[in-house]
């Protein structure tokens, strides 16, 4: 029974890694490729490592497998974020089907720093709710 579980976990992990590799070929832009590769490879690697640890059953193998999983789970999302950020600032073209660019206009093109939010909607005066002068029929302003 243990061999079937190990085989199943290894096959599912291998399929996820293969799907991640296929995503590199099929996705139309850097950001979609990065998303597919990151998710598929992390989940696939976790399953392959667990399958390997189950097969050998030794505490040393379990320790090395879990250390590998922990390292990849902690570093791969950070690396993907940095690659995506570099691609965005390098003006890598978005897919033609992309409808919204939520970062457009929010970064300083020279320093790549996030621009401060628009504070014109926020006032320094006490809110109507604090002063008690609020009209019950009037909706609060955000």
Image: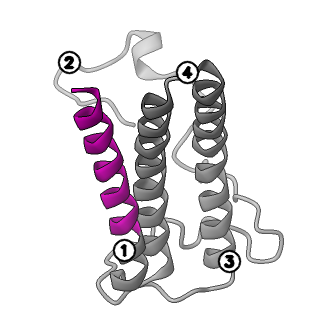
Q: Check disc 2: other Cα within 10 Å, few if <14, some if 14-19, many if 20+.
A: few
- Residue 116 appears left or right of 92: right
- Residue at 61%, 45% in the rendered image: 72
Q: CA distance from mark 1 to mark 4?
A: 52 Å
For the C terminus, the image quarter is top left
Can you identify the residue that label 4 sits on? 126
- Which badge, 1 or 4, is on the more N-terminal residue? 1
Q: Extreme right residue here?
A: 111
Marks 4 and 3, how far apart at CA: 40 Å
In this picture, is 39 found above or below 97?
Answer: above
Q: Reading the chain from its start, which is encountered first: label 2 or label 1?
A: 1
Relative height, residue 12 to residue 91 (above, below): above
Q: Earlier in the sequence, mark 4 or mark 3?
A: 3
Residue position marked by numbered label 2 in the rendering: 136
Residue tagged by mark 3? 89
SS assignment at label 4:
loop
* Label 1 CA crowd tier, 10 Å (few <14, some 14–19, many 20+): some
The numbered dot on residue 23 is 1
- Classed neighbour count for the residue bearing mark 4: other residues with Cα under 10 Å, few (<14), some (14–19), many (≥20): few
Q: Which residues are magenta?
A: 1-20
Q: Point out the tag, 2 or 4, that comes first from the N-terminus.
A: 4
* Nearer-N-terminus badge (1/3): 1
Q: Check disc 1 and report its element: helix, strand or loop.
A: helix
The answer to the question of whether label 4 and label 3 lie on touching residues, with beta carbons closer than 8 A, is no
**Disc 2 and disc 4: Cα gap in Å?**
17 Å
x and y, in percent, of residue 121 in the image: 51, 46
- Percent of width and height locating residue 21: 42, 73
Comparing 74 with 94, the one in front is: 74
Residue nearer the viewer, 98 or 16: 16
What's the distance in space between the residues labelled 3 and 2, CA to CA? Answer: 48 Å
Residue 116 forms part of the magenta stretch: no
């Amino acid at each position: 029974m243990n061999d079937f579980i190990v085989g199943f976990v290894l096959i599912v992990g291998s399929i996820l890694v293969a799907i991640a590799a296929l995503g590199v070929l099929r996705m139309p832009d850097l950001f979609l490729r990065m998303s597919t590769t990151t998710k598929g490879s992390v989940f696939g690697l976790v399953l392959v490592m667990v399958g390997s640890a189950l097969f050998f059953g030794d505490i040393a193998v379990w320790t090395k497998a879990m250390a590998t999983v922990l390292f990849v789970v902690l570093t791969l999302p950070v690396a993907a974020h940095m690659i995506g950020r570099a691609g965005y600032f390098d003006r890598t073209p978005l897919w033609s089907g992309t409808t919204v660019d939520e970062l457009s206009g929010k970064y300083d093109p020279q320093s790549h720093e996030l621009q401060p939010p628009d504070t014109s909607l926020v006032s320094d005066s006490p809110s109507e709710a604090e002063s008690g002068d609020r009209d019950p029929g009037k909706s609060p302003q955000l």
